[in-house]
Amino acid sequence: MTGDLLTLAVELAWWQQTGIRAVVGLLAVLLPAGTLVYLFLFKMMSFMQSRLGPMEAGPYGSLQLLAEVGKFLQKEDILPAKADRVVFKAAPFVVLISTFLLVLVIPAGPDAWFIDVDTGIFLALAVSSISVIGILMAGWGSSSKYSLLGGLRAAGQLVAYELPLVLAVMGVVIQAGTLNVQGIVMAQATGEIFGWGGIGNPFIITQFLGFAIFLVAVQAELTQPPFDMPVAESEIVTGYLTEYSGLRFLLFFIGEFATAGIFSALAATLFLGGWYMPGIDPTSDLFNVIGPVILMGKMILVAFLIFWFRFTYPRFREDQLQQLAWKVLIPLSLVNIMLTGVLKVVF
Amino acid sequence: MPPTIKIPGLVKGLGVTMRTMVRTLTKGSHTVQYPKVKETPTPRARGVITLHEDNCTACMLCARECPDWCIYIEGHKYKAPPRRLGGKPRQKNALDRFDIDFALCMYCGICVEVCPFEALFWSPEFEYSEPKIADLLHDKSKLGQWMETVPDFQDYEAGSEAKKAQVPR
Amino acid sequence: MTAVSDPRQMAYIAGQASDARVNVEIETEGMTLNIGPQHPATHGTLRIIVKLDGERVVAAEPVMGYMHRGYEKLSEVRTYPQVTTLVNRIDWLGSFANEVPFILAAERLMDVEAPPRAQWIRTALFELSRIANLVLFLGDMGVQLGAVTPVFFAFRDREFVLNQIEAVTGGRFHPNFDRIGGLKDDLPKGWIDETKGVLGRIHTFCDEMEDLVTGNEIFQSRTRGIGVIPADVGLSYGLSGANIRASGVDWDLRRDGGIGLVHDQLDWKVWTHPDGDSFARYWVRLQEVREACDMVDQVLDGIPAGPVMAKVPRIIKVPAGEAYVETENPLGVMGYYVVSKGDLVPYRVKIRSASFNNVSITPWLLEGTYVPDVVSILASLYFILGDIDR
């Protein structure tokens, strides 16, 4: 993670700084994706199903990811005959662009950040909607009935769940008083619970409703069960992903898990305190080193919840999904905002 | 009497998966990591058919009863020397060829059951897959080699009137 | 626009036409979708041509026959033990149950009755195959609706039942154990105690399914009120088994049929549910698994001593005549109509399989439902392709 960090150590040329930023950004996207895929998709899902998961590739199957990547890379690149080539090929990249833009906003230490803008959260929520375009492109560009069905379902679902996502974050913003993500982390780090500043003031305590709504909305944004109608495998054979194979599917796959990881990291930043750990002064340089590790740990914790729900529940039907969003989540999040506003003034 | 709190089904479901995960982590999973660990099948498992050649008289009953016609038998009659001095030469059957094509075999067991001379037996061995299908035709000698893997017949449950047969060794 | 006004005929023609276009053209109104024959939702190669209007089904038609293996024709040239072997493979999940009605029909023709010990062991294996079959259903309906975990629990616990069947018969999936006049062999030592332990595991599995699936609010909202089959419609289509019991019809051939097994000497009850929706069908089968476990428990306690095979000649020639025997198989009512002319081979065997009738209700049932509900309904009707197509 760069930002101010690079100017402290040694004076690097602009292109070298950008190069390091790009590499670190790539790592910041791929590392959560890989960790989540291995830990949760391979291992946790297997243990919850009373089996072992991959065990052959590497010790305890840790190199299974490499095997999967290799497998996808060597597959034939199939394009449906009547597919719209440009749209079909561009769709995975649009989804990935949204992921990469999202990771820029999350800080991993007091000086370790990519960008530090005053409207950080707003930017994050805005760019996360770009993936919807990518999914629609995939559904349309595949020129297959199954894909179209999946794409249409996805469009409705993702747009509907953007709102609870945004509204849940509003509560945090009101409590922190700033849209700046670093500011939100600092507010949690330096805050106090009824006068006791021992562990700071992680917003999950007061914003538990917002946290719950955020998690549900994230699950829907990622099209994970119980909200995976668009990729309902037993019905429309992975929906908008049906015609993608090989490298293109790998891009979607990485995009899905990377987005899961980054949303978890965002949830950890907004509700659990981000890179801060109680006991150490928030402005110390130590956090620049251990901050990423702490953030990773909290991300894994939140992702555990997301994946736990994923492996346990069957999926909602599309109209039930929409009902949940519009009739339950949005009113609840509005109530949450109201309460937060009132209590913020009171206390 | 405090009111019983009804735990919503969603939470109970989470409990089940969590419990299974903890059980798998602490007590191990049900997965048997073949081929490093192998489970032994039950003694009656129908793995492979074996031939005890001494008992076979090439009566062709098994070849006839097989639903798939996967048993190929060829035999000839010959005259054996008389048992006593001055007696007639005895006509005996000799077995030339006894092949079972396991690519066709349905593992139904009719041949084993129908054999009147107890020349065919089941063995629980199952690891005999071959890269070439033609190698799945087991000839007389290979079928005889499987005899070593045939387990003894099991005792029966209490109340049974069946008599335990013996495996010729 | 066209001369065809009947919507179902239109659906059929559109379905045939859509094959030629190979799913290339996208119509936004009145889309025809082919569910299957290769599809994760259908248990095998069933093809359902569905005409959609948005996400609503306007017409549906199942196309069967992709797995037709010619059982009835094959039976005309196979001896009775050979037919028994073949018949295992009709309903391959609970395969001992397929042999029973055929053997009973042949026994009726031969006027031979199996000794009591054989009848009791037959009942035990019959109910064990019911458990094996329905346990898979309990997990499988979960996965059709998106819950990936129950199916693994189902396969895990089904292994124990299959191991027990293997310990007796030698084959996990295709026991080939029933013979005219009794059974092929007797029980090995220790089998009764082992099986009782397995039954405890199945009870735990049922409780887990109750927590994980039936108690789950999402599952309930996906299945309650979906695919309601009124009792009279179900009976007129020939539904049987848990499908019709879930519509409130109290009919079970084990109790009402007088078949040659020992169910009338056991203490058990028939489970029905008044609703007739997908949830009811799942719930009834869950209770049936528990009931079957208790039945096996009682049977194992009461197996009488004695021979396991009646006196029958070595080469079986069934005297001329016809017999029809139906039993309450895991999937529904299965019947065999055996016509014999006094030969080694039957003259004609007609198989009345449960799933064929269960699937025949899909055109009526799927009309007006949503596409996700199609999967929920098909999963809850629970057919096996080998049973439909034979």
Image (cartoon, coloured by chain):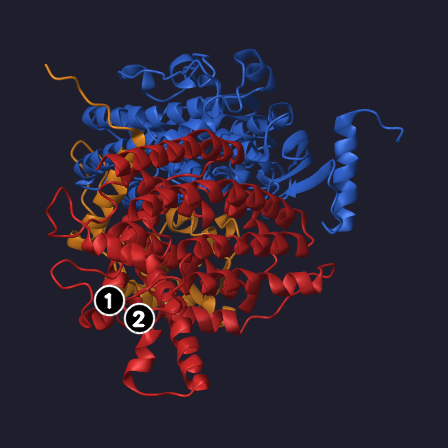
Q: Residue at x 55, y 70 (%)?
A: A75
Check disc 2 and report the residue beneath it: A112
Residue B160 screen position, x and y as percent: 20, 34
Q: Image quadrant of residue C215?
A: top left
Question: Please, what is the three-letter code of the amino acid marked with disc 1?
Answer: Gly
Does any portion of residue B130 appear in the rendered image?
Answer: no
Residue C311 screen position, x and y as percent: 35, 30
Q: Residue at x 30, y 37 (%)?
A: A340
Question: What hue represents chain B?
Answer: orange
Question: Please, what is the three-letter code of the amino acid marked with disc 2?
Answer: Ala
Question: What hue represents chain C?
Answer: blue
Tag 1 subunit: A
Q: Nearer the viewer, mark 2 or mark 1?
A: 2
Does any portion of residue A102 appear in the rendered image?
Answer: yes
Q: Residues within 10 Å of mark 1 (few under 14, many from 20)?
A: many
Front-lying residue, C322 or C90: C90
Check disc 1 and report the residue beneath it: A291
Residue A275 screen position, x and y as percent: 25, 62
Label 2 sits on a secondary structure element that is loop
**Quadrant where the N terminus of chain A lies?**
bottom left
**Quadrant where the C terminus of chain A lies?**
top left
Question: What hue represents chain A?
Answer: red
Q: Residues within 10 Å of mark 2 (few under 14, many from 20)?
A: many
Query: Measured along the vertical axis of the image, is residue C21 above or below residue C112?
Result: below
Query: Measured along the vertical axis of the image, is residue A241 above or below residue C252?
Result: below
Residue C57 screen position, x and y as percent: 65, 31
Q: Residue at x 61, y 52 (%)?
A: A136
Q: Is residue C190 left or right of residue A143?
A: left
Which disc is residue B11 wearing? none
Front-lying residue, A216 or C297: A216
